Image (cartoon, rainbow, N blue to C red):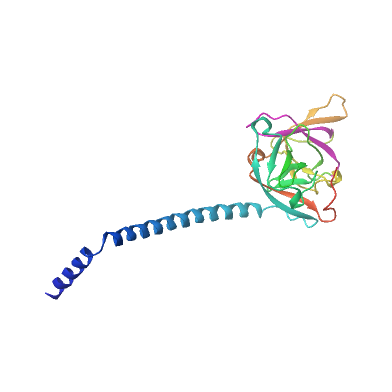
Amino acid sequence: MSGKITDLQEYWALRNHSKKDLIETIRDLARLNASYELSLSENAALKEELQRLEKLLSLPKLPEYQQVLARVIRRDLSSWSHQIIIHKGQKDGIINGAAVIYDKGVVGRIKKTFAHTSIVELASSPTFRVAAKFQGDNRPITYQGISNPAFTDPFGEILNIPTDIEVSKNEPLKLVSSKLGGVFPDGLTIGTVKNLTPGTDGIFNYAKVYLDKNLHAITEVAILLPLNKTTDNYN
């Protein structure tokens, strides 16, 4: 009997709630639901940021350089394989000619700086040239980019390969940066060489250099600023 009386009391208590109280309750529930949705969105953003940082942690340790991380904010279809624009510039200490890298190796170098942004010339650009060498061989050679069609795998070329260098598709050679160029430190991956072609002069060989496929899809880079040369341009 007491249970029925309690049920009747709760029933009449609910009936006595005003319409205003019900509207306020609905609004509170809506705000709570919005708060939950915001928390889910923030958790997804934090997860994405964590994955980005984990990827960047695989960058090589270069004690002679300050590494400034930057996002890619623009990439034009007409210059897809030639350049990118990043969200760091002169206000962040970025200088013309500075090396730009990512976890796979060489990206390119700073072509032009503005107050808050910079243009990066990619390693696949036909105007990009850098001193390089084959891994395990200290003789300097010159790498240069080639005009790459948009949305294709990036590549470049070498024109002055000594004729005693041997390579095969089963044992490709890794091309890395050379500090002799004055821009990049030693040993950063540029690409791989799978075959050689005799040059017209009979003294050097020619090779196509296959760059990492991710070069044309990167979203994060690191700019290398020499600790002993932070205010001067390379140019």
Q: Nearer the viewer, residue 227 or 124?
A: 227
Left or right: 40 as drawn, with respect to 58: left
User: Where's the N terminus, which quadrant?
Assistant: bottom left
**Residue at horizontal 76%, vertical 50%?**
224
Residue 59 vertical position relative to residue 162 in the rendered view, above or below: below
* Residue farthest toward the top in the current orientation of the protein: 200
Res. 110 visible in picture: no
The image quarter in which residue 151 lies: top right
Question: Where residue 39 sits in the image (x, y, percent)?
Answer: 47, 57
Question: Where residue 51 sits in the image (x, y, percent)?
Answer: 58, 53
Which span of residues is magenta-colored?
138-162
Left or right: 133 as drawn, with respect to 74: right
Res. 133 visible in picture: yes
Left or right: 37 as drawn, with respect to 118: left
**Residue at horizontal 14%, vertical 72%?**
5
Is residue 190 in the magenta section?
Answer: no
The image quarter in which residue 195 lies: top right
**Residue at horizontal 31%, vertical 58%?**
23
The image quarter in which residue 189 lies: top right
